[in-house]
Amino acid sequence: MSLFATSRDIDVRAFAAVCEQRVNAAEYPHAQEVVSQVVIYDADALRSAALHDRLGILSELHRLFRDGPGVMVVRNAFPDLAVVDRHSEVFRQIITDEAARVVRADHFAKAGANQRIWNSLQKAAEHSPDSFIEYYANPLLGLIAESWLGPYFQATAQVNVVTPGGQAQQPHRDYHLGFQSDEVAARFPLPMHRLSQHLTLQGAVAHTDMPLETGPTLLLPFSQQYELGYLAWRDQAFIDYFDRHAIQLPLNKGDLLFFNPALFHAAGTNRTTDEFRMANLLQISSAFGKPMETVNRERMMLALYPLMLKRVEQGELDEEGMQAVIAMSADGYSFPTNLDTDPPLHGMAPQTGQQLFELALQERWPVERFVEAVEVMRVKRLA
């Protein structure tokens, strides 16, 4: 089999065979119960077990995310719900402050359908350091993140409030490859598809009670094990399978939900008329998602563009050569960025430096226009 695959290689029957596995509760001795193939832990029991056998707990959770159903819930993770309430009020104040000036883009739902706070981590820390400290002092967050990613992980967070009547997201996989088109994902060899899910962990803190009618996250246990899933989640047969087999669990305020980013999932429809379902979404990244050196790509682009433009105009640099130089000099990835000022309005990923460089050369922009565009792109990405 080729190490490169396309959407022509996906097979919903193979996907179904993966997803129809059953959880063996004996493999998770520290769990409280298994509900709808989701492993449920009690927060006090998990904390106690980690004090006595931290490595054993880390191993159990890692196997759950990799070889098991890929999704877990921790009940009563915040024993003092006033801590959650105070942080919810911080989020509401930020939402109010931003309402008139921030474009509400989204990745897997219609823009503006829900209330979003991008980079809620930094904004909450700056808005209310006291609330931030008491909220993130919860050691379970680090325990679960370390089980999948190891130490030195990097946290980001985004608040999502699904308003009454808010519609479900489309089923999807998440960052990294989940944010790329099928065509881009197909350019990555399959070992990189497997690696993508090991680079991040998805989590959520429930900031409100989430009975089923409010639309808690739809989940498809074991779906992270399907190797071609990053090429499959837009396919209608897979969407139909998800619609028939995805499960939902009601959550209580203060519960934690964590899952492998390759798990097929989607925020559900809020069928209530007066409940605002709020979750703080945690996207935690491996420490290894960084280059070895700091490189100023904008300065490189500005230094190269005048000569690149001249060579292209004079026929001294063909398309293949142009693409090679762009690939070695400009940033080919959209992230990290500031999603408030650089939102995913046209797809799921903002314009990259490589795309800007290529567009400018193809359209023969004057140097002054290119310089201005590079500066606009740089400023948009700042937090």
Image (tube, helix red, strand yellow):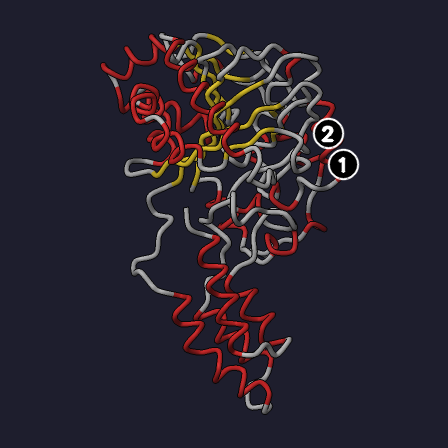
Can you give x and y, in whole percent of width and height, for residue 228 in the image?
Answer: 61, 44
Would you say 275 lies left or right of 252 here? right
Q: Which mark is residue 124?
A: none
The reply to whether callout 1 and callout 2 are in contact (CB within 8 Å) is: yes
Separation (CA) of disc 1 from disc 2: 6 Å
Can you give x and y, in whole percent of width and height, for residue 51 in the image?
Answer: 23, 15
In this rendering, the answer to whether 43 lies above or below 174 is above
Would you say 47 lies left or right of 381 here? left
Would you say 16 lies left or right of 31 here? right
- Residue placed most toward the observer, 352 or 143: 352
**Label 1 environment density (alpha carbons within 10 Å; few <14, some 14–19, many ≥20):** some
Q: Residue at x 68, y 30 (%)?
A: 16
- Residue placed most toward the observer, 164 or 157: 164
Quadrant occupied by the N terminus: bottom right
Can you give x and y, in whole percent of width and height, for residue 362 in the image?
Answer: 63, 76
- Residue placed most toward the observer, 51 or 5: 51
Q: In the picture, residue 81 is in which quadrant?
A: top left
Q: Residue at x 53, y 24 (%)?
A: 69
Can you give x and y, in whole percent of width and height, for residue 193 in the image?
Answer: 52, 47
Q: Which residue is mark 1?
A: 237
- Residue placed most toward the observer, 218 or 8: 218
SS at circle 1: helix
Q: Amino acid at mark 1?
A: Ala
In this rendering, the answer to whether 135 lies above or below 345 is above
Q: Which residue is mark 2?
A: 241
